[in-house]
Image: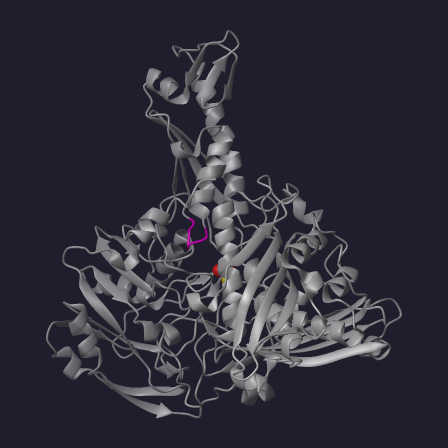
Amino acid sequence: MISRLDGPNKVTGRARYGADNNVPGMVFGHVVLSTIAHGRITAMDVAAARNAPGVIAVYTPFAPLRLRTPVSPFLGATWVPLQNTDVAHYGQPIGFVVAETYEQARDAAMLVGVSYDERPALTSMRDGLATAQDAPPAMDGAPPSLAVLAPGVESIEDALAASPVVVEATYTTATQNHAAMEPHSAVAVWESGGLTVHSGNQGSDLVAAALADALGLDLARVHVVNPFVGGAFGGKGAASTPAFLAAAAARDLGRPVKAALTREQVFTATATRPATVQRLSIGADEDGTLIALRHDSWSSTTATPGFVEPTSHGTSREWYATPNVAISQKMVPLHVPPTTFMRAPGEAPGSFALESAIDELAVALDVDPIELRRRNSSVAPPGKDLQWSSKHLDECFRLGATRFGWAERTRRGRADGDWLVGLGTATAMFPALRFPASVRVTLRDDDTAEVATSGADPGTGLLTVLALIGAESLDISPERVTPRLGDSALPPGGMSGGSTATASAGSAIMIAAPQAIDELLALASGPGAPFEGAELSYADGRVLAADGRRMTFGEVLRATGRRSIAAVGSSAPGEEMTKHSFSSFGAQFCEVRVHRWTREVRVSRMLGVFDAGRIINEQTARSQIIGGMIWGVSAALHEGLEIEESGRPANGDFASYLLPVNADIPDVDVAFVQYPDTLHNPVGARGLGEIGVVGMAAAIANAVHNATGIRVRHIPIAIEDLL
Ligand code: MOS
């Protein structure tokens, strides 16, 4: 197993992130944020800021940098700052001060006076429920409400009414900020009519397209570079406010501009995971066989509706076998920071509700929760004919139960001194997707190779995985392969999102590599070449002739006077979509200890067993899963953005926004059952970037119930919930 290739650069500080770039003549921009949640800016007094030391420009909606709203087929419309005087949430970008130094820009930004025509703000999910609207269709086109009913069943209500056992409950989940280690930032350099932007993101070609669109530029003149990304997971999918403002100001001023959000600004000037309210109704037979499943969801969005957390849609496209399923998906527009994708959008908070409700059913029926899940395992998505290409969820549970000591679980937990100990479990599912991607494979005359694509490695391990798949496809050792990512000048790799990158880019490599080898063989057997006219094959990095002669590809290139040979391969989802359904699966286990007197909850053991097809690199795969599982602990016990009535976040900084630290996390055990899924893509790997978070919050809440008998139906779970 090889170690993460970008690891040494990252831990020694050699990795250069977007804002680490410094350019001669560079100036600094600081973003000004609104201090009301709803209304209109009537005036901005910028005289004091304009006259402050070092200030070069102050941009506002009254003196804006002209930006158009970019619309991508992938992300929809991206909001651009300063284009009008409307304020839709507290902490919205409303100005941009550019100065010779960062400190001068920040100080001058404090001097900007803003007058508002303030209007009443709606900031609480509870108050907003009354104004809920149907959500727009999901990304896969699913309508906001849908039902699949067995023949002769009139409604989901009838199916529930006819069920011998019914569990009904409402669950809520909190707004989460991505809180990525690298705050959103950009360095924009404008030279000879072209724009270069260094900025952490999830897909440099997508950000380049957004900036070109916003600035009215030919895409060929925009270059976006992001070899390293300090965390993203949905939060850097779209171009950021610093990227738009730095790019536009650099053009306006004719100087390079650096802009970075402060940590506090990240909490309002980027986008969050929505808060959700979810109502579950499950009807079952006495033996636990599901008869009806109903999942109604409400997701917060910003006031100009944006991203909706597809919690119910997740239930309708995966999960359990049931003859009757009905879902609805509503949105609640609020004057709160914008919403966007966050790791396992839909499934992460959706599984808290669904997998808590399944646990409640297990308790009601006095059936083991794993046995209940096994009885209702699906062979296809609810209401669909296309069966899962490969599903080994039962094996995940079997293996996990043995490894975790599930057999020792009792119905009421156990006591260990002053600690109440409980075990919990949950299913994890996340759809296996892939997107169009192109990768260039280059053979070089020094017997090394390069695989290159514009996509991003936001800590996922993609860089390492590309090198490995490249090495395998070229039949050479991984040390000889240089992977390159994060540059919009490279073949378009799309977005590192949706747990797709390995399947998407890996498939493209498997198309490009044989093409490069074919070209090599043609070159080697061409007129005047060392193997002129010979029948050739390729293995082990070498060209082989039938008579036993052989040369490495580097030797062939040198002998023919070539520095390199390259091929670009492109892959996209195809016919397989008409033959099977695709998902990754997993079984989550955890042990919690709840203190009898203080009621603090400690997670003492965690195990996740996953079925994600072939694992290309166990180290980075494990790290992805561990990160996801810890994200689940965070959701269950720590994280939640609290919005005050005024719209101001009460905990919009790292002093008060709780995230788990080392002391909160035990050793995390991860196992994979490996069944390469070549029905999904030639690499055989299904996505695993997001599934690690799915189910974990429910597993913890279920363990808390096992330990204490208290069912908490909201996350994060607080001490006061367990008094
Ligand atoms: Mo993501 S939420 O896979 O960008």
Q: In the figure, is residue 294 to the left or right of 155? A: left
Residue 73 shows in this picture: no
Taking the magenta stretch, the answer to whether it contains residue 664 is no
Give residue 360's quadrant in the image: bottom right
Dividing the image into 4 quarters, which one contains the C terminus? bottom right
Give residue 259's quadrant in the image: bottom left
Q: In the figure, is residue 540 to the left or right of 395? A: left
Q: In the figure, is residue 601 to the left or right of 34? A: right
Q: In this view, does 456 lie above or below 606?
A: above
Which colour scheme appears in the figure?
one colour
Q: Is residue 159 above or below residue 682?
A: below
Residue that protrudes farthest toward the top in the picture: 547
Most common secondary structure along the magenta stretch: loop
Residue 224 in percent (x, y) is at 33, 53
Residue bounds of the magenta highlight: 455-460
> Foreground: 666 or 12?
666
Residue 517 shows in this picture: yes
Q: In this view, does 653 lie above or below 129?
A: above
> Foreground: 677 or 65?
677
Query: Residue at 48% across / 65% down in the picture?
Result: 665
Residue 215 in percent (x, y) is at 32, 62
Q: In this view, does 192 lie above or below 52?
A: above
Residue 648 in percent (x, y) is at 39, 85
Residue 91 in percent (x, y) is at 36, 80
Give residue 636's quadrant in the image: bottom right
